[in-house]
Amino acid sequence: MKQRSWMILAVCLLLGCALFAVFLITRSSAPQLTQEEAIDVTRKVEFAFRHKNANGILMYIAPLPDTRIANINPDQLHVLLVRYFRNSDRVGADMSHYVFASTDSDATLQFDLVVHNDGADSRKEDYSGHITLHLRRVEVPQMLGLYQTKEWRIVGAETTGPDLSSFGD
């Protein structure tokens, strides 16, 4: 082989090793969830909500068959959010009064939630309730299922507010 071919092969091998090292470093989240990390998840969900990004919200929900968010599955939640975003002006959510509890494999975050739809000259409160999020470290497929990582995701939620099946109507 020519010297140029060896150099290209060496660069490719070096890049492969670097990618593998990055993979090992970033492949899983912390073993125990902290209150700041749990609140950060709700802030990211709220950011996706403000930008009317239903898929951005659903990426924080566990891809498990028994996942329920206020008695609806993630597919139903996706349809509900898309319909709500289509029929709303400028949306926002206010969260307050956080209460957090955690073990090694599960966590619970409770907070008060007010969802509002702001028009040009009005502010309509569409939803208000106390939310209890259940979070768990679950296996999440990455890169089209080539490997899986353990990440903290929402596996369930309960609310004291109105039934979500009519949300946005």
Image (spheres, rainbow, N blue to C red):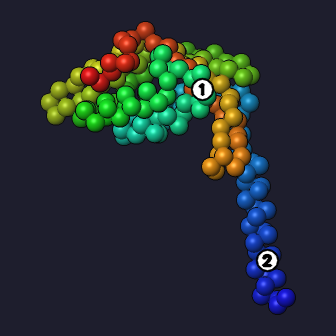
Counting every numbered tag in the picture gives 2
Q: Quadrant of the C terminus?
A: top left
Tell me which corner region of the image, top left, top right, bottom left or bottom right, holds residue 10: bottom right
Q: Which residue is mark 2?
A: 9
Identity of the residue drawn at 23% across and 22% down: 124
62 horizontally vs 160: left or right:
right
Horizontal and vertical percent position of residue 41: 54, 31
Give left or right: position of 59 versus 4: left
Amino acid type of the residue tagged 2 in the rendering:
Leu
Disc 1 marks which residue? 65
Q: Secondary structure at mark 2?
A: helix
Give the quadrant of residue 149: top right
Identified by mark 1, the residue type is: Pro
- As drawn, the residue found furthest toward the right would be 1
Q: Residue furthest bottom?
A: 2
Q: Which mark is residue 46?
A: none
**From mark 2 to mark 1, how far is it between C-alphas?**
44 Å
Can residue 123 be spotted in the picture? yes
Q: Nearer the viewer, mark 2 or mark 1?
A: 1
Answer with mark 2 or mark 1, whichever residue precedes in sequence: 2
**Alpha-carbon neighbours of circle 1 within 10 Å: few (<14), some, or many (≥20)?**
few
- State the residue at coordinates (66%, 35%): 151
Q: Residues within 10 Å of mark 2 (few under 14, many from 20)?
A: few
Residue at (82%, 90%) from the top-left corner? 2
